Amino acid sequence: MNVQRTSLDHDKRFDVKAQTKAQFQMTDLGISSLLNPAASISTQSRALHRTRTPGLGKPGAFTVKRAFDVVVASLLIVLLSPLLMAIAIAVKLTSKGPVFFAQRRWGKGNVPFLLYKFRSMHVELQDRSGIAHTVKNDPRITSIGRFIRRSSIDELPQLFNVLLGDMSLVGPRAHVLGMHAAGVRYEDLVPEYFARHAVRPGITGLAQVRGLRGEVTDAGHAQARVNADLEYIRTFSVLRDIRIMLATIPAVITGKAAF
């Protein structure tokens, strides 16, 4: 599989060196090794090196994180209930179809789950597989859908996913099964891709506040996203979750990279 090398400027921007070929196969290592809670996987050329992951070695940290998720998600649902109702009515009145959009995404331990969002696309045009990326001025998006996507309001139903235990407030973003980046499946493009599923996916995450969201057009951007996810897994804490959530607010207000 050949992947075009990115420009030097792009490599500097994302602080990652893109590879021209992805020759490592997931089957060479195995899912159990990738999800080993004592280590994460990183690559340098074709060699694999293990690095310690302090956060995953502390079970108590997950208990505190889960309690924080449930309390905050519950409060947000109550406080935002008028907005949730208003958006639900607007979605229903402005286009045919259901209020919510449900899609299978990768969850913790590579176990798929149904992720919920406010529907932002015309039913007859939407891609339920999620493989087709949304692009600027996408004709599939409804009038209200353009607003709720740019403001990330379409993500709010995921608060219920948090209560159900499928997601966390903060973590690696939940990708669709078979997601592509630069025309190539993520797991083929980035060998350590499945290691990002060692924790629950999040509504927001470190990659998002760093501006690593939106359409992925090359290997460098894809690698940078996964690198940020693995960095979060290695260093997560409730305090860092709070910082990431606060950093998400200006990103949502500006609508950066959302369309």
Image (cartoon, rainbow, N blue to C red):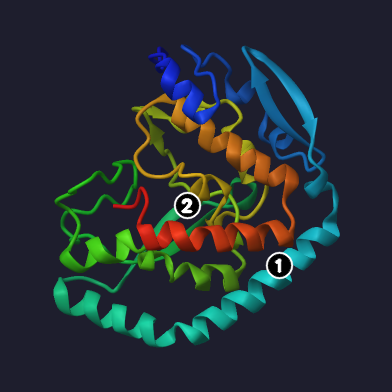
Under circle 1, the secondary element is helix
Residue 150 is situated, as x and y percent measured from the top left of the image, at: 31, 59
Residue 65 is situated, as x and y percent measured from the top left of the image, at: 72, 64
In the rendered image, which residue does mark 2 sit on?
A: 105
Residue 167 is situated, as x and y percent measured from the top left of the image, at: 58, 61
Q: How many marks?
A: 2
Q: Nearer the viewer, residue 56 or 128?
A: 56
Instruction: Calculate the distance from the C-alpha at mark 1 to the C-alpha at mark 2.
Output: 20 Å
Give the side of residue 155 with respect to residue 119, left or right: right
* Residue 34 appears in the picture as rendered: yes
Give the side of residue 145 with respect to residue 162, left or right: left
Mark 1 or mark 2, earlier in chain: 1
The residue type indicated by label 1 comes to Arg
Mark 2: few/some/many CA within 10 Å (<14, 14-19, 20+): many
Residue 195 is situated, as x and y percent measured from the top left of the image, at: 64, 37
Q: Residue at x 15, y 74 (%)?
A: 94
Marks 1 and 2: which is nearer the front? 1
Does 142 appear above or below 77? above
In the rendered image, which residue does mark 1 sit on?
A: 66
Quadrant in which the N terminus appears: top left
Mark 1: few/some/many CA within 10 Å (<14, 14-19, 20+): some
